[in-house]
């Protein structure tokens, strides 16, 4: 059970990093090889959220890998797809067809069986 809780937290951190990355890229503007462009990125605080979420997720992943069998831990990363779909609907207001929700349910079922 502890592995499931840790995997859920780690997956939420991965998904959060992706959400922050999308916001950072939306705010970034058109890319240019200019100092002003790169300086402007220093005030794009979404980059900080992205890095913090990825960093925390990486540290937690190292803990998981150290303390749990790889064959049980690695498939649980796919929980991040579940949280990604939820974020797509709740944060980005995307329409998700039923076939994708079926896929998410299959992923969740697979994680259940892997964790047993």
Image (tube, rainbow, N blue to C red):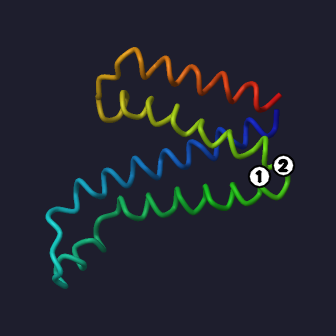
Image mark for residue 68: 2
In the displayed structure, does residue 27 sit left or right of residue 57? left
Q: Is residue 10 above or below residue 38?
A: above
Q: CA distance from mark 2 to mark 1?
A: 6 Å
Image mark for residue 112: none
- Disc 2 is placed on an element classified as loop
Name which quarter of the figure residue 75 lies in: top right
Residue at 78% x, 32% y: name it. 115
How would you rate the neighbour count of disc 1 (Cα within 10 Å): few for under 14, some for 14-19, many for 20 or more? some
Q: Is residue 3 above or below residue 13?
A: above
Residue 45 is situated, as x and y percent measured from the top left of the image, at 34, 63
Residue at 75% x, 44% y: name it. 73
Name which quarter of the figure residue 40 lies in: bottom left
In the displayed structure, does residue 42 sit left or right of residue 50? left
- Disc 1 is placed on an element classified as helix
Are the residues tagged 2 and 1 within 8 Å (C-beta)?
A: yes
Residue 3 is situated, as x and y percent measured from the top left of the image, at 79, 40
Residue at 84% x, 48% y: name it. 69
How would you rate the neighbour count of disc 2 (Cα within 10 Å): few for under 14, some for 14-19, many for 20 or more? few
**From the image, which quarter does the N terminus lie in?**
top right
Name which quarter of the figure residue 28 lies in: bottom left
**From the image, which quarter does the C terminus lie in?**
top right
In the displayed structure, does residue 68 sit left or right of residue 30? right
Residue at 16% x, 83% y: name it. 34
Query: Residue furthest toward the top?
Result: 98
Q: Which residue is mark 1?
A: 64
Asked whether 25 or 71 is in front, the reply is 71
Q: Is residue 112 above or below residue 6?
A: above
Residue 35 is situated, as x and y percent measured from the top left of the image, at 19, 85
Query: Residue furthest toward the bottom?
Result: 35
């Amino acid at each position: 059970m502890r592995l499931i809780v840790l995997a859920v937290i780690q997956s939420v951190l991965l998904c959060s990093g992706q959400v922050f990355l999308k916001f950072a890229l939306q705010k970034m503007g058109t890319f240019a090889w200019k100092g002003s462009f790169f300086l402007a990125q220093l005030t794009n605080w979404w980059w900080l959220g992205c890095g913090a979420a990825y960093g925390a997720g990486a540290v937690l992943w190292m803990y998981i890998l150290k303390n749990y069998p790889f064959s049980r831990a690695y498939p649980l990363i796919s929980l991040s797809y579940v949280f990604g779909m939820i974020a797509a609907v709740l944060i980005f207001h995307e329409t998700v067809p039923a076939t994708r929700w079926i896929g998410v349910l299959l992923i969740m079922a697979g994680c259940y069986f892997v964790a047993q």
